[in-house]
Amino acid sequence: MKPFLLLAGLLLAEGSAAAQTASVPGSASVQVAAPAPAAPDTLAAIHRLFAAKRRRGNFIVGGTLAAALGTAGVVVANRPTESSSSNGSGFGVMSPNNLDLAMVGIVTALVVPTEALLLGGWGAKYEQRVATAWQQQHQLPRAVKRRLKARYFR
């Protein structure tokens, strides 16, 4: 029953669309309206978008660093106190007591640069290139156009 109703609805819509596009006798060509001028505050919206992306990136990277420092602090605070660093096992700096702290450092060393690279694409140089392209050609890169929402135009 649903496919039948869907088919009937599509046929009705096609019929009304064809009736709306039927040309008036005597007019052989269709006049296309000129595109609307760009919003006057598009450049300001681009600047707001880039500022918001940079601010979000700073919070994410800063939060990751704060979490890593907090985790390292918890690891250090929960260590048992010993008289020697190797505890006589011969491990030295890489003793099992230091391994957890080393893992926190390794994970942080991998995550923070990755975040910085991913979020660093919204830098001032790229913003300047996008703004210049918008002023000259009234075209935006697809990624910028997709993320440029109405809230940036306020």
Image: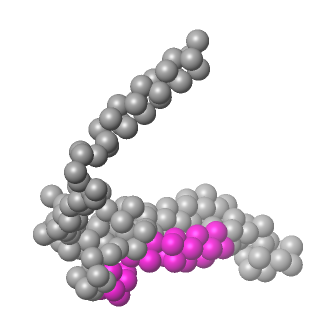
Task: Say which quadrant the N terminus sits in.
Answer: top right
The image shows residue 32, relative to residue 84, as above or below, that is above
Q: How many marks?
A: 0
Q: Which one is nearer the viewer's eye here, 154 or 6?
A: 6
Q: Farthest residue toward the front?
A: 26
Q: Which residues are magenta?
A: 106-130
Left or right of 35 in this view: 139:
right
Question: In this rendering, does residue 14 appear at all?
Answer: yes
Q: Residue shown at 32%/35% (left/top)?
A: 19
- Locate residue 34, reporting x and y percent: 20, 65
The image shows residue 145, relative to residue 8, as above or below, that is below
Question: In this rendering, does residue 82 appear at all?
Answer: no
* Residue 126 shown in magenta: yes
Q: Quadrant of residue 122?
A: bottom left
Left or right of 3 in this view: 122:
left
Q: Quadrant of residue 48?
A: bottom left
- Locate residue 20, reporting x and y percent: 29, 38
